Amino acid sequence: MADNQASTASPVAANDSLAPAVAAPEPVPQSEPLSEDQVVNNAGGFVFKVDDFTLLRRFIVLGSDANNYYVSRQSVDLASAQCVVRLLAAGQGEAVVKEVVDISREGRAPKQASGIVVLAMCARLGDPATSRAALAAVPAVCRTASTLFEWVQRCKELGAAAGITKAESGAVDAAAFTAWLAAASCDADAAADAAPSGGRGGRGGGRGGRGAGGRGGSKDAGGGEALGGLGGRAGKLSWGRAMRRTVARWYLDKTPAAVAYQATKYSQRNGWSHADLLRLAHPDPEEHAAKRRKVAAGTAAAAEAVPVAAEAAATSSASTGADTDSEWVVVGASEGEAAGSELGALAAAMAAAAPATAAGGDAAAAAEAQWVADLKAVFTFLTHGTVPGQDQPPKRKKAAAADEAAAAATEPAAEAAAAAAEPAAEAAAAAEAEAPTAAAPPAPVVLSPVMQYLVDAHRLRKEIRAPPPLKSAAGKDGEEKGGKKKGKRGRKAAESDDEEVPEPELDPEVVAQHEAATAAAVESALTLIRRHRFGHEHVGDTVLLRNPAVWGAFLENGMPLTAMIRNLGRMSELGLLAQPGYQKRVTDRLRNVPALTAARVHPMTLLDAMCTYRNGAGARGKARWQPVAEVTAALEDAFYLAFKNVVPTGKRYLLGLDVSGSMGCTQCSGMASLTARQAASAVLMCLVRTEPWVKTMAFSHQLVEFDVRETERLEEVVERSARIPMGGTDCALPMVYATEKKLPVDVFVVLTDNETWFGKIHPTEALKNYRAAMKMPDAKLVVLAFSVNDFSIADPKDPGMLDVAGLDSAVPRVVADFVRGGL
C-alpha cells in the first residue's frame, strides 16, 4: 500500500543546507555547466544532451504534433529528422528500422505517423542494406491500407532529397541533408507567405482511379498533409522493382477477404487510392501462387531427404491442428480486432463455401484456384469497378483529346448527318422491337462470398441513400427574405417577424412519402450492416450516419474498440448512450481487459478520449453532446487497465510531480486535449496503484508534500496539483528533500515537461550527494518527460539514471525493469 500518512502540506525550504555529516562540495548552479557534456537548453539552464537513439525513440513515441512551451514545432521536427539521418550515416540504419518495428508492434506510440516517416527515410535515404530492411518491414509497420498510403506519400515527398550527396556506404550525407532541410524550410516559409490567406489547401492533383477503389491522386500526385519538418518540397516517387515488389507483396500476402476489408474500410488516403497502387505495382496472383507452390515443393523435397525431421514436423502440425490450406480461405488473425469483428460473417461464409469447392478434386488446388480467382476479381473491381461477368470499360486512348477536338470542329456537319439518319434509325429500332428474341438473357453471375462482400460494401457506400430532412420551400424562402429584411428594417422589426411568422405546416402526403423512403433506406442499410458486420466507414450517406438505429447496429455487431472510443461523442449526441442497453455494452467493453489488449489501445488515447468526452465537445467541428457519467467513469477505468501488468518491484519510491507554470501550458505531444500536468498526474496515479511503497511530493520553486490515495480519481489529483503555488522548475528538490530528511529511497521518479532552470544545484549532482549521504550507491533516478525536447535532465553516462520518452503502455514495465537492474 502506498505511503499515505496524514500530513499537513507545508513548504520545505529549497536551499537549506544539507546534512552536516556530508562533506559535499560547493553546489554548482544550474546556470553553469557541470562538465563539457552539457549544453544550454531553451530556458537558459545547462543539461545533458541526449544521444541520437534516445532522440529517435522520443520522436517515434511522442511525435512532433504539439508545440513545447519553449521550443517551436519546426525546430523539434528538424532536430528529430537530423537525428535519423545521423544514425543512417553512422551505419545504424538497420537498428533504426528494428526500433520502428518494435515500437509499432508493441503499440507503444499513440500514433504511427512518426514511425512511418522514419521508415520512409530509411527506405529512401539509407544504404542498400537499410533500404532492404525498411522495405521488408513495411508489412509489419503499415498494417492497414491507410498507413500504406501514408508511407508511399512520405517516400514520394522524400524524393526531392534523391540528389543529396551520399557517403561511400550509400547512405545520405548528414551535412548535405541538413543543408537541404534548411533550404526546404526556407522555400516552404516563402511559399506560405506568398500564398493567399483564407484559402483551402488542395489535395494532390492528377487523374484519380476510375474503379471502385476510390477517387485518388495520380501516380505522381501527392495529396494530404505535407511532411512536417522536411520542408514539403515536391518530390517524385521512383517506382523501381523494389518499390513495386514491396507494394505488390503487401496485397498478395493477404487473403482476398483481408484485401476486400482494407479496400472498403480505407478506400483512399493522402491522395492515393488502391487503384493507383495496383496500377503501379502490378501484383499478379497467379505468379505469386506459382512461387508459393515452388517453395512448398522445395520444402517437401527437403523433408523427404530428412525423414525424421519430416515425421517430427507432421507430428507437430497434427498436435497443433495446423492446416496448410487454411491460409487460402480463412481470414488471418493478424488482421487484428477490427477485422475479426467486421469480417466475422465473411469468414463464416468462406468456411461454408470451402467444402463444396474442394469436393470435386484436390482440396489444396481448389483452394488455391479460388484464392487466385477471388484476388483477381478484387483487383479488377478496385481498378475498373466491374465484377466477374461484366465487361471492362474501354480504355481512354492517348489521342482521345485530339479526336474530341476534331469532333467539335465538325459538329455542324455531324448534326446534319444525324438529323438525316434519324428516320432510318427509328424505323430500324421499330423493326428490331417487333422481331422475336433470338436468345435468352444471360444468367446472373453467382458471386463468391468475397465478391459479394465487396459489391455490398460498394452499394452501401455509393448507392443506398436516405432522403435529406424535410424543409418547407416557403419556410426556407421566408428565412432568406427575412434575413435580408433584418438588415434593412432593423433589429426590432426582425424580432417581430420572428415572433409572428408561424412555422409552415408540411403536406402530410409529402411527410408520409419521406418517412417511407427513409425507413426503406435504413432497412436496406441495416440488412447489409448486419449481414457483413460493416462499420461506420462503409456507410457513405451522412443522413444514415445521423440515424440512431444505424449506430445501434454497429454496437450490436461488435464495433471495433478504437472506433467505438472515437465515436462516443457522436453516439451520445444521438441519444444512443442514454439507453441502458447500449450504455452497458459500451461500459462493459471499456472495462474488458482482453479486448483492450487485443485492440492495443494506447493509454494516452483513452486519456485523451476521456478528456474530450467529458468536455462535451470535440476539438474540431460543431458536435456537442451531454456526457454520460457512467461512460466517463468507464473511460478512466480503461485508462488504468490499458497499462500492461507490472509485477511490483517492492522498492521504495519518491515521486516528484512538477507543478510549475509550464506544466499547465505545454500540450502533451500528439494529444491536443491533454496538458503535461494531466499526463504526469495519470502516470503518478498508475505508479501509486502499482507499487507497495510510494511517497508523492509536488515541487516548483519550493517543495510540498502531496499525498495521493490509491482510490483517488485522476481529476482530483489534477485539480489539487493545479492549486499549488507555481514558480520556476527545480527537479533537484526531491533528492534534496530526501537528503535533508534522511529518507531511505530506492528510486526517485520526476514527472516534468523536461525544462529545468531554477535552483542552485543540478538534479544529477543532488542524486550523487544523496547516494553519498545515505550510503545508498544504487539509488536511481527516473525522469519522465511529456514534451518533445532534445535535452535530458538525467546524466546519460550514469547507469543509475534513466530517461523515458513520454507516456506509453510500456512505461510501468520499463521503470520496473530498470529498478530491478534489468536495463
Image (tube, rainbow, N blue to C red):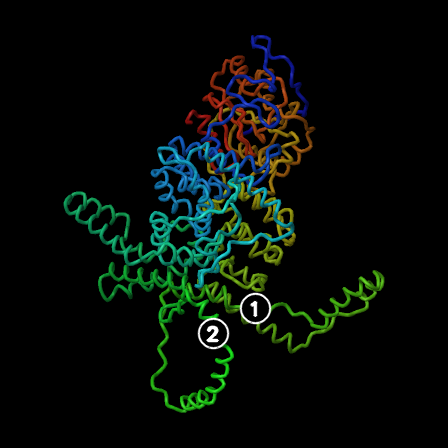
- Say whether residue 277 is left or right of residue 467: left
Residue 823 figure quarter: top left
| Residue drawn at (35%, 83%) of the image | 440
Q: Say if 364 sits above or below 721 in the image.
A: below
The circle drawn on residue 266 is none
* Total number of numbered discs in the rendering: 2
**Identity of the amino acid at label 2?**
Ala
Camera-nearest residue between 686 and 439: 439
Residue 147 percent coordinates (x, y): 45, 49
What residue type is disc 1 on? Answer: Ala
Residue 296 in view (yes/no): yes
The answer to whether mark 1 and mark 2 are in CB contact below 8 A is no
Q: Which mark is residue 407?
A: 2
Of residues 29 and 421, the one nearer the viewer is 421
Q: Is residue 780 above or below residue 572?
A: above
Apparent side of residue 320 relative to residue 233 in the rendered image (left or right)? left
In this view of the protein, can residue 633 be seen by the observer?
no
Q: Quadrant of the N terminus?
A: top right
Q: Is residue 158 above or below residue 218?
A: above
Instruction: Tell me the distance, in whole angstroms, between the alpha carbons under discs 1 and 2.
Output: 40 Å
Other residues around mark 2 within 10 Å, as few (<14) / some (14–19) / many (≥20): few
Residue 726 is situated, as x and y percent measured from the top left of the image, at 68, 28
Return the x and y of residue 373 as percentages of the image width and height. Answer: 32, 63
Q: Which residue is mark 1?
A: 466
- Dot 1, crowdedness within 10 Å: few (<14), some or many (≥20)? many
Does dot 1 land on a helix, a strand or a loop? loop
Residue 788 image point, x, y percent: 55, 34
